[in-house]
Image (cartoon, helix red, strand yellow):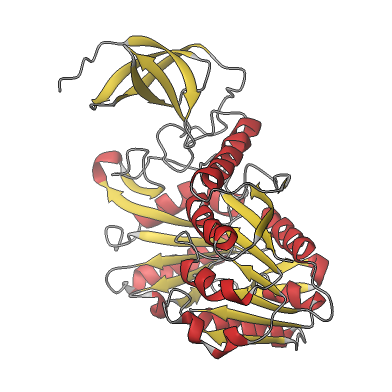
Amino acid sequence: MSIDRSPFELRIEDLTLDGQGVGRRDGKACFVPGALSGEHVRAVQTQRKRNYDSARLESVLEPAPERVEPPCAWFGVCGGCRLMHADIGLQRELKERSLFEALSRIGRVSPERRLEPLVGNTLGYRRTARLGVKYVPKKGGTLVGFRERAGRYLADMWDCPVLHPALGNRIGQLRRLIDGLDARDRIPQIEAVVDDSGTAALVFRHLQPLSEADGRRLAEFAVAQGLQVHLQPAGPDSVHYHAGPRSALTYGHPDFDVTVDFAPLDFIQVHAQINREMVRRALDLLEPDADSRVLDLFCGLGNFTLPLARRAGEVVGVEGDARMLERARANAEAQGILNTRYVCANLDDETLGDRPWLREAFDRALLDPPRTGAAMVVEALGPSAIPRLLYVSCNPATLARDAERLVHHFGYRLEAAGIMDMFPHTAHVESMALFTRA
C-alpha cells in the first residue's frame, strides 16, 4: 500500500493507554504519537495498514488544556519517556484507566474500592538505570543514555532530568570519559544506581580486558567524582569493585527502622519515595499483628519482608535468586530481625504446590512478581484460602489474568486496587491489589 507523504489535518478524538492520539481519517483510525485527545493537529502519514494508519506529528494547531512543555531537551528523540508532553494528572488518569480496564476486560473483576494513587517526585526520581554506550565517530564520539524512540540507535543526549541528579547530570561527563578510553568502542553499557546517601555506583561492562591506562583513568574519575566504579568483564558474577568510596550501598524504610544493603546489580525499586509509600500502604492493607504468619513471595532483598517482620509474628520470604536471598538473610541478621525465614524456590515451577513450606498455615501473603505475573503461585496458593493476599504488580494484564483465577476460581474478593506512579512520564503501570476471603 502506497503512503501519501502530504501533510494533513486531523482532530484527535481519543488517547491510547500508551499515549498515542487517535483520530479518524476518511473513516479509518489514525494513530499519532505525541498528540492529545481534543487537539487539532497537522501530521504526515508514516504507515498504512488495512485497519489503521500511523502518522508523525508535525504541529499542534489547537493544543489540549492538558498539554505541557516537556522539561527535557531530548523529549521526542529519546525513547525513555513517552508522556512528558501531558500534564501529570492526565498521565495518572491513563494509568488508572489501564489498570481498571484490564481488570474488567481480562479479569472480569472490579475492585470494591479504588485506592488513591501513590504519587511522588516526577523529576530526578529514577535511581537505577541501564545506560547504553556506543562510540559513533560520525556523531563526534561516544553516546551514553537511552535508545531513540524508534528503538535502533542511542539518543544523542547530554543529560537526563528524570534520572537522579547524581546520574542524570553526569551523562556528558561519561561521554567525555569514555571518549578518552582505549576501550571506547568495546563498552556497550553502564549499569547505574544511587543509594539513599546519594552515592552513585557505576558498573562498566567491557567486552575485552581493559588496559592499565584505562583502569587508571576510570579510577581517577571515580575519585574525582566521589562515586563507585565497578567492572564487569563477563556475566553478572564477574562484577567487582574497582575504585571510589567503598561504603555499602543502602536504602531505608525509616518508618520501620529498616535498612537494606544491596549490590550494584541487585534489583531495587527505581523510585525511592514511592517505594517507601508502597511498603507503608502494603502493611496498612495486610494489617499484620504479632500473631500473623506472613508469606512474602518474590521477596528479593527483603524490601517487604523486613518491614513486615517489625509487625508480624513470623515472615517467610521466598525468592528464586539465591544471591539476593542471602543478602535478605544478612540484612535481617544485621538488624536483629530474628522472626524471618528464607526459602530459595523457582516460583514459576508447575510443581510449586508440592513444596512443604506452602502447606504451612499462613494468614497473610504478599506477591511481588515480575511482568510475567504469578500464575503458578496463584494456582498453588489458591486452595489454601489465605485470608488476606496482597498482589504488587508491574503489569496490569498479568495482574488481571491472575485476579480472574483468584476471584472466579478460588473465591476471593477484590477488595481494593490502585496505581502507584513509580515511573512518571512513561506508560509503565505499577499497581497494588488486595484480595480477601472470609
Give the x, y percent position of residue 13.
48, 18
Q: Answer left or right for 420 relative to 321.
A: right
Q: Residue furthest right?
A: 290
Residue at position x 61%, y 40% in the image: 96
- Tell me the quarter of the picture where residue 210 sits: bottom left
- Tell me the quarter of the picture where residue 55 sits: top left
Give the x, y percent position of residue 161.
57, 42
Q: Answer left or right for 249 relative to 312.
A: left
Between residue 78 and residue 347, name the one nearer to us: 347
Q: Where the C terminus falls, by quadrant?
A: bottom right
Q: Answer left or right for 96 relative to 221.
A: right
Question: Can residue 276 be seen by looking at this rendering?
Answer: yes
Give the x, y percent position of residue 116.
73, 44
Q: Where the N terminus falls, by quadrant?
A: top left
Question: Can residue 169 be seen by looking at this rendering?
Answer: no
Residue at position x 35%, y 22% in the image: 30
Give the x, y percent position of residue 353.
50, 81
Q: Compared to 332, does 101 lie above or below?
A: above
Residue at position x 59%, y 49% in the image: 109
Between residue 386 and residue 230, name the one nearer to us: 386
Residue at position x 41%, y 80% in the image: 237
Q: Compared to 258, does 274 lie above or below?
A: above
Q: Compared to 157, does 308 lie above or below?
A: below
Between residue 212 and residue 283, name the one nearer to us: 283
Between residue 77 and residue 85, name the one nearer to us: 85
Q: Compared to 33, does 435 lie above or below?
A: below
